Image (cartoon, coloured by chain):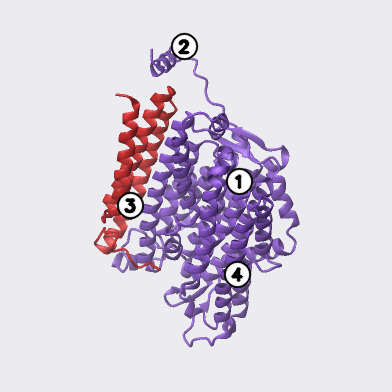
Chain colours: A purple, B red
Amino acid sequence: MSTTELVLARGTAVLAQGDISAPHIEYGQLAPMLLVFGVAIAGVLVEAFVGRTWRYSVQVPLAFLGLIGAFAWTCVLAYTDKPFHVAAEGALAVDGPTLFLQGTILVLALISLLLIAERGTKAHFAPQAAALPGSEAEQETMAAGITQTEVFPLMMFAVGGMLAFPASNDLLTMFVALEILSLPLYLLCGLARRRRLLSQEAAVKYFLLGAFSSAFFLYGVALLYGYAGSVRLSVIADQLSKNAGSETLLLAGAALLSVGLLFKLGAVPFHMWKPDVYQGAPTPITALMASCTLVSAFGALLRVYYVAFENLRWDWRPVMWGVAILTMVAGAIIAITQTDVKRLLAYSSIAHAGFLLTGVIATSRDGLSSTLFYLAAYGFTTIGAFAVITMVRDAGGEAGHLSRWAGLGKRSPVVAGVFAFFLLAFAGIPLTSGFTGKFAVFKAAIESGATPLVVVGVLSSAIAAFFYVRVIVVMFFSEPEADGPTVVAGPATAAAVALGLTATVVLGVLPQPMLDLAGQAATQMFVR
Amino acid sequence: MSPGHYLALSALLFTIGAVGVLVRRNAIVVFMCVELMLNATNLAFVSFSRMHGNLDGQIIAFFVMVVAAAEVVVGLAIIMTIFRTRRSSSVDDANLLKY
């Protein structure tokens, strides 16, 4: 009898006895994720059954409560017992790094929600996505003052996927989480209120490239399944330490899997989508992607490389060195030539992904904790910066072109000053969170023997500082245009900027509590 | 036939899909090529499942089918929207965002 027939025979025997045990799910430990998904589904029901005039006032509190509840529950999980176990039959992990990342994602999503929830003249989303740009139907929906509310359930689904992505302990769960986080984001990218052609183009590009990269991810999963006979990360690690199985399948699988993961975090050479999508998408969604998606993708990357491929370190580290160097240098150099503010920040985000990769390459406890800290620090700063971009407006919506920002420092010194501060934090000037994060990551990399990488990192930070300073010079040292943009700030956007600013200052001046928290989260590393 | 042949077929289909994504112009055809890649992956999962004698691979194939179906819904919605706006589904025409 062949092996398959044996398995089938065993399966039939179990069926005949009727004693298939139901899987054991630890609902308490998965509650943050389940709560977010539950709110997303409730949001869909609200869309279906609540009248149009009431939807906004139901959806927004629902989304806020869901995120706050999930964050509170995550804190409870982190403080009540030592979180270091797997849940849902080993499909999801509940450990220090996961809870830290999930908490970070939830807080960042809350701040993004402040931006997404702006309405009226400051709304960011097309009232009806199906109405053609420039058509009568569009003008009618605009005149009727309809507020787009479908974005709230879509955002909650995306956030749920982001929570599951770094928690997934097997590659199938990771793939499903990747799709749950990506599919709503593809749609959200195409929903901008103004410059709708750009927005739709961004959605198509993001979708086609995203689907292409997840196909690579999936084929990598298939090859690793062929190598280890299981998609569980710990089983792949065991198989690796036994040195069993076909090395071709292992290396090809690991490479394809890495393509999928590196695409999500926008590392060179898989970065082409990032500037286009960041520029075209509605700015609150750009803020959500630049912060939460990056945190989530790095969480998954860390888990895969620290758990499954730990013993393959000598094979993947040289490749990651190359990717990290390319990402830092290309991100910093291409950013110099940019003239659009959102595009500039997209390239800056690519460069930051490179700095973060140096922390991943360290493959040590310090590397893990410094990457966690950097992710949190960068997330707050980037949301704050994109929130400022939503405030600087002219007749056609946000003033994206850098030349329009000329003299903003004379017209509205506070807003320009805050934006300059965020840029300095991106550049890594001391007393900002960017400095602490970069210092921690580079220190961990040097301790693990990656000094050349850190030298490249510092050099590309210097290149990056050049274009950040150039924006500051444009804002403060050139004359404002007569018809220049004005600063329009709703209370929610102002709150988002304030939160981003506070976090950037506190994590720069007083980083120790947060560093300790990241250190505690990383003490036991990842559960297997 | 040994499962090895099916693996070779799956790799071939995956490559055809990947090349299709890179060379075709029509967004719908590009998307179909991505679907071909996903289906090639399913074939690989099922073949490996037989080689290892466990059912994980076959179950994963079902998950992939569901995910691919969800992706079709989202993808066609996005491609439809841009087609209605531009009267073209060529990926070369969507060229406002560059450099």
A448 relative position to A234: left or right = right
Percent of width and height locating residue A338:
47, 72
Q: State how far apart marks 1 and 3 are (Cα).
A: 31 Å
Pick the quarter of the image with the C terminus of chain B.
bottom left
Say which residue label 1 marks: A70
Percent of width and height locating residue A492:
57, 65
User: Which mark's residue is nearer the viewer, 1 or 4?
Assistant: 4
User: Which mark's residue is nearer the viewer, 2 or 1?
Assistant: 2
Q: Name the foreground residue: A456 vs A215.
A: A456
User: Mark 4 Cα within 10 Å, few/some/many (few <14, many 20+)?
Assistant: some
Q: Are marks 3 and 4 in contact (CB under 8 Å)?
A: no
The amino acid type of the residue labelled 2 equals Gln
Which is nearer the N-term, disc 2 or disc 4? 2
Percent of width and height locating residue A359:
62, 52
The amino acid type of the residue labelled 4 equals Ala
Tell me which chain the residue with mark 3 is part of: B
Say which residue label 2 marks: A17
Let me know if marks 3 and 2 both belong to one chain: no
Pick the quarter of the image with the N terminus of chain B.
top left
- Circle 2 — which element? helix
Say which residue label 4 marks: A462
Q: State how far apart marks 3 and 4 are (Cα).
A: 43 Å
Q: Is residue A326 depicted above or below B8 in this figure? A: below
Q: State how far apart marks 1 and 4 are (Cα).
A: 39 Å
Give residue B77's mark: 3
A379 relative position to A520: left or right = left
Residue A308: name its quadrant.
top right
Give residue A378's mark: none
Q: Name the foreground residue: A453 vs A265.
A: A453
- Circle 3 — which element? helix
Residue A465: name its quadrant.
bottom right
